[in-house]
Image: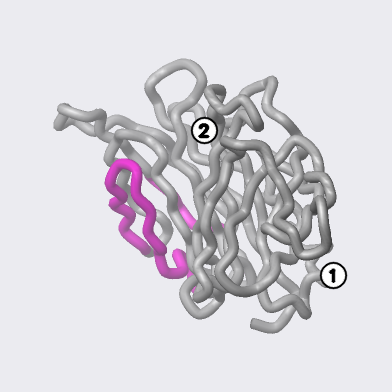
Amino acid sequence: MRAIVFLFCLLGFAVRAAENSPRTCRIVFPSAPQDAPGKLHLFDGEASQEVELPQWNFSPVYKVRPGAVTLALLPAAPPAPAAPGAAIPIPAGAPKVAIGEGIGDFYLIVSSDPSNKVAPVKMQVINADSSKFKRGQMLWCNLTRNRVGGKVGSRNLLIEPNSRLILDSPATRMEDYHVNIRYILPGKEQSEPVCETNWPYDPRTRGVFFIVNPPAGLVPRIMGFSDFREAAE
């Protein structure tokens, strides 16, 4: 069996502080390089907060103001405006991402961008609204150029390169389920194994899985995270 890194971290103990927020965010930095920043400041155009950029689990839940906003990641909190009501200046070229007004809860996926001299990262947003991504379901994000597929419990998985999909519950109750996943390199027809094992299922959580390229070698790596929320959805 090929090597696999599978991290299924039950989180949510920091959720209570954000239960009453109309919009929340969790952050993860899969495949972060060794010199990647562990924390940055998340600026929404009006206010800034220091946030964690963990590689092996989701960050705590952060509140983000509602409405259409543009988020920026900065090495430090921006200075106060020059005058009341004036725009808050931020460094040119800071990594930014737009959040549409219709997006509620979301995940902020951070990746490395050494060319950015303000903060060496870039971001993408994944809608995590509970009406679209329900408890028990699995969100798969393929960050490689490979086709990946196989059997995940009672479900068939087939995900194209650089794409994402939601897979329905792989089991019916809290139990282990069998997983057999393979990949196909670009231009090839023969599939190769990624892993064959058993994973735990908890119907109270939403599972988020990233398929990433390892630092060395061809075999994709799967990183799995569990988003458990105590708040009613």
Report the amino acid beneath label 1. Answer: Ala
For mark 1, give the secondary structure: helix
6 sits left or right of 62 in the view: left
Q: Residues within 10 Å of mark 1 (few under 14, many from 20)?
A: few
Q: Is residue 162 above or below residue 1?
A: below
Does the magenta run of residues contain 36? no
Which residue is nearer to you in this view: 153 or 13? 13
Q: Which span is picked out in magenta? A: 155-180
Q: Residue at x 48, y 33 (%)?
A: 221
Q: How many marks?
A: 2
Q: Quadrant of residue 107?
A: bottom right
Q: Which residue is mark 1?
A: 17
Which residue is nearer to you in this view: 109 or 225? 109
Q: Residues within 10 Å of mark 2 (few under 14, many from 20)?
A: some
Q: Residue at x 42, y 31 (%)?
A: 220
Q: Residue at x 43, y 17 (%)?
A: 217
Q: Is residue 175 visible?
A: no
Residue 232, given in percent of the width and then of the height, sits at: 70, 83
Q: Which secondary structure is most common in the magenta stretch? A: strand
Residue 162, given in percent of the width and then of the height, sits at: 34, 43
Q: Is residue 155 visible?
A: yes
Q: Is residue 121 above or below residue 169?
A: above
Q: Which residue is mark 2?
A: 4
Inter-mark Cα distance, 2 to 1? 34 Å
